[in-house]
Image: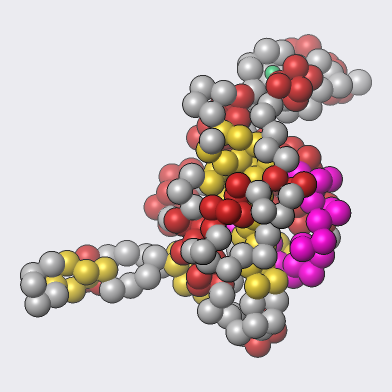
Amino acid sequence: MFTSLINLFFPRACAGCNSFLLSDEKVICTSCRHEIPLTNHHKTKNNEAFNKFYGRIDVKFASALFYFHKKGIVQEMIHKLKYKGHQEIGEAIGNWYAEELKSIEELTDVAYIIPIPLHKKRLKERGYNQVTTFGESLSKNLNIKYNDTILIRNVYSKTQTKKTFLGRSEVVERIFGVQFDESHHNKHFLLIDDVITTGSTLEACSRELLEIPGSKVSIVCMAMTQ
Ligand SMILES: [Zn+2]
């Protein structure tokens, strides 16, 4: 009753196409829900997301829920999530994806869901990490701990670059790092992000997590460019 009153005065817009949502529609409208391009990655182990990392880094499982197209529904949703404060979009995608991921055998022993850490400056400007609500809803639905302290982003400064003997600058510090203790040994980590493009950030982060003794890594993202 209260929600329908709110909707009457402040109609909610679909995150995909901006049309008004009906009272029984959440975040995206029925038409967008049917049109949104699904990858169906989780149905095959050797999917495009998995193959993207194959030979680069040892991941147990990799998948994205949607395809990301320029000017498409998914781009619109991710844009609102990233830049317009619509964190409920991440939550909705997490709830949706958790239903599909529940039955994935490769993920049954995952101990922690780990978000790609945002640059401190970016975090300050935006006020939130765009993958937090996605990760938290996966965590709640799959009953896996969410941890945003194991994987860290190192802060850059000019003093960390050194001149090589050829006079070139070389970044000596790695962008990402891990903070862990013995309780994090021999664990399976599920790394999450919004969109897989080249996969290089996810690769760098996986590499760091694999520094933890006995660790395994899997990757789950909201979308992937096609
Ligand atoms: Zn829509």
**Residue shown at the point (17%, 67%) measured from the top left:** 169
Q: Nearer the viewer, residue 86 or 151?
A: 151
**Residue shown at the point (74%, 50%) measured from the top left:** 44
**Residue shown at the point (49%, 52%) measured from the top left:** 199
Q: Nearer the viewer, residue 218 or 15?
A: 218
Residue 127 drawn at (x, y percent): 52, 46
**Residue shown at the point (58%, 68%) measured from the top left:** 58
Tell me if residue 55 is in the magenta stretch. Answer: no
Q: Tell me: residue 182, above or below residue 206.
A: below
Residue at the outermost bottom position:
182
> Horizontal placement of 133 versus 144: left or right?
left
Q: Tell me: residue 22, above or below residue 96.
A: above
Q: Does residue 199 show up? A: yes
Q: Tell me: residue 72, above or below residue 135.
A: above
Question: Where is ligand 1, by quadrant?
Answer: top right
Residue 145 drawn at (x, y percent): 75, 65
> Horizontal placement of 32 versus 142: left or right?
left
Q: Does residue 205 show up? A: no
Residue 180 drawn at (x, y percent): 59, 80
Residue 70 drawn at (x, y percent): 49, 26
Q: Which residues are magenta?
A: 97-116
Q: Which of the 4 image quarters holds residue 99?
A: top right
Q: Which of the 4 image quarters holds residue 92?
A: top right
